[in-house]
Amino acid sequence: MKIILTNMCMIHNLETNKVLVLDKIKKEGWEGLTFPGGHVEKIESLTDSCVREIKEETNLCINNLELKGSIQWYNLDNDERILGLLYYTNTFSGKLIENNKEGRLSWENLDEFIEMKDKSNSMDDIMKIYMGKYKEVIGYYRESELVNIEYKK
C-alpha cells in the first residue's frame, strides 16, 4: 500500500472569530474553499511540514499547533491511501499574502464558513473533526467516486 502524508491547518483569529480560508485553484478533487496545507516532504517531521506549508502558502508563521485528528482518502482501485493530519492554531504572525499559486486567501467568519456551499468536497467532514465531533474520517473511493465513509470518535 502506498501512503501519502499531507497536512492542513485551521488558523483561527480568536479576536474576530475568523479563520483563514483558501479558495483553491481548480485541481481535480481539491478545488473550492479549504484551509491551507500540503504534503509532508521526505525526512520532515509532521508538525514541521505543516509550519513550512503554511509559510509557503500564506507567508504567516504559525506556532502552538494542536493535532485535531485525521482524514483519510483510500483508493480501492490502486491501494493508495492519503492521510491528512488536521492541525489547529490561534498563534500566528506575519503579513498575509492573499494571492498565491494555490489560490486566494481570505479571513472568513468561522460560523459563516461552516455554512458556505463552495467548500471543497471533504471540508464538511473535515469540519466535523475541527468541531470535535470525530477524531478520524475515512473515505473509500472506487473509480474516483466515494463508495463508503467511516467516522471514528
Image: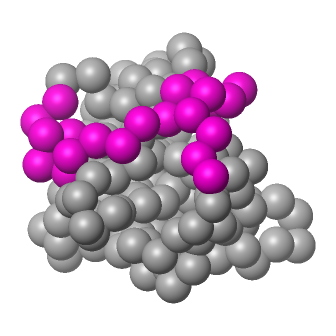
Q: Which residue is at a point 21% across and 46% down the rendered structure image?
A: 109
Residue 40 percent coordinates (x, y): 73, 60
Q: Nearer the viewer, residue 54 or 4?
A: 54
Q: Is residue 113 magenta?
A: yes
Q: Which residues are magenta?
A: 95-116
Q: Quadrant of the N terminus?
A: bottom right
Q: Is residue 43 above or below residue 110?
A: below
Q: Is residue 63 above or below residue 83?
A: below
Residue 22 percent coordinates (x, y): 47, 36
Q: Nearer the viewer, residue 53 or 46?
A: 53
Q: How many marks?
A: 0
Q: Is residue 15 above or below residue 143?
A: below
Residue 14 percent coordinates (x, y): 27, 69
For the question of whether residue 129 can be seen, the reply is no
Q: Which residue is at a point 43% across and 81% down the rendered structure image?
A: 66
For the question of whether residue 62 can be seen, the reply is yes
Q: Which residue is at a point 34% across and 63% down the rendered structure image?
A: 13
Q: Is residue 94 magenta?
A: no
Q: Which residue is at a point 53% across and 69% down the rendered structure image?
A: 92
Residue 121 percent coordinates (x, y): 33, 30
Q: Is residue 61 above or below residue 108?
A: below
User: Which quarter of the figure has residue 16?
Assistant: bottom left
Does 22 sit left or right of 42 as displayed? left
